[in-house]
Image (cartoon, rainbow, N blue to C red):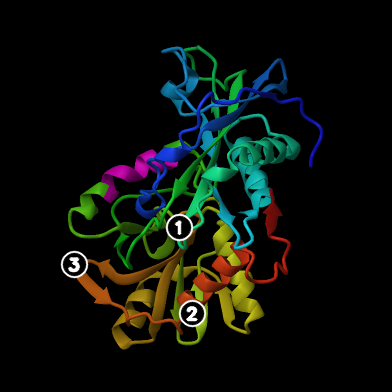
Amino acid sequence: MIDTLNIDINKVSSSRISELDEDNLVFGKVYSDHMFSADFADGKWGNFKIGPYGNLSISPANATLHYGQSIFEGLKAHRAENGEVLVFRPEANAARLNKSAVRMCIPELPEEIFMQGLQELLELDKQWVPGKKGTSLYIRPFIFATDPYIGIRPSETYKFMIFTAPVGAYYSEPVNVKIETGYTRAVAGGTGAAKTAGNYAASLYPAVQNQKSGYHQLIWTDGKTHEYIEESGTMNVLFLIGDTLITAPTGDTILNGITRNSVITLAKEWGIKVEERPVKVAEVVEAAKNGSLKEAFGAGTAATIATIKTIGFEGTDYNLPEINDQNLSSKLMRALNDIKTGVSEDKYDWIFKV
């Protein structure tokens, strides 16, 4: 138990837990009883509170609404067979939040605020962590500017919040993706490595247009030449070509995915050859044509592992081999889920117990 913060806790008068239907959880539609908040003012973080989940009141001149100074994270808590609540790699999320903060001119958040706020919130809302297979409690920490000021400069005040949502699977089936070579998600020197709201806003239009053609997600390419694979809309992308697992290196245009890092760690432990290097679109397409592309999958918090069924490129769809329980992506999914739910040993100290 971290004992550094004085958190003002105001519990709900009546829980909404009776409304929770674990058999019909839609991702991002149902929210737990409480939320944690902290404010940055006069050069320091304070005003730590947990209160009922509810709407916020902000000025129409709120700086975030006009200039997008906002960052966020996503992580999950799982219910172990013995009833414990286990959170997967929260310290990594706290560290990445601060990397985003630096890029977006937001004051860094001390890890103890992130961790104790998270722990206290989850202790209060433990009952909201679902226990059915394939379910989890999605956790959304975020920071946004709060100055009521119309002028382009970093805000002087901010709010940090955490709320949670019981969720089912993000993708219910293998996904179809299209390699995007017209629109650009991020460019060198931009904000692609930060988990900031504007990155996602900019990606919506091309994603929606391609969803009309049956693609669940886009695979983004580099903004300069569109010759190299970068990442997908909700996840990093990995390719098993021959016996080698290949993925683009993280940098200032690619988010440093925590699930991606976990996948690479496990694959190397299993003796699989892993290459983190620039991946040419032409290489992936040729591998799909000649059959050496054995698997392609996304790795991210929401989906964990999202198997790719079809890759579209320049008007042609390339169908990948069907996936079974013995494929690498299936094994990785099981291994990660077993660690997250306490079935397997936590060799890497990835689990935080509430």
Say above or below: 163 vs 217.
Answer: above
Say above or below: 97 vs 152.
Answer: below
Image-based side of 186 in relation to 2, left or right: left
Of labels 3 and 1, earlier in sequence is 1
Image-based side of 324 in relation to 111, left or right: left
For badge 2, the amino acid type reads: Leu
How many residues crowd around disc 3 within 10 Å: few (fewer than 14), some, or many (20 or more)?
few
Picture quadrant where residue 287 is located: bottom left
For badge 1, the amino acid type reads: Met
Indicate the position of residue 247 as horizontal and vertical percent values: 50, 69
Instruction: Please state which of the two labelled residues, at mark 2 or mark 3, is closer to the viewer.
Output: 2
Task: Tell me, yes or no, whether the highlighted magenta stretch contains residue 287.
Answer: no
Picture quadrant where residue 145 is located: top right
The residue labelled by disc 3 is: 315
Residue 88 in sight from this viewpoint = no
Identity of the residue furthest to the right in this view: 3
The span from disc 2 to disc 3 (Cα, nearest Å) is 28 Å
Query: What predominant SS class does the magenta segment belong to?
Result: helix
How many residues crowd around disc 2 within 10 Å: few (fewer than 14), some, or many (20 or more)?
some
Of labels 2 and 1, earlier in sequence is 1
Residue 183 in sight from this viewpoint = yes
Nearest to the observer: residue 188 or residue 260? 260
The residue labelled by disc 1 is: 235
Picture quadrant where residue 289 is located: bottom left
The residue labelled by disc 2 is: 328
Residue appearing at x 32%, y 76% in the figure: 285
Q: From the image, which quarter does the N terminus lie in?
A: top right
The span from disc 3 to disc 1 (Cα, nearest Å) is 23 Å
Indicate the position of residue 219 as horizontal and vertical percent values: 36, 60
Indicate the position of residue 138 as horizontal and vertical percent values: 50, 47
Q: Which residues are magenta?
A: 199-207
The span from disc 2 to disc 1 (Cα, nearest Å) is 17 Å
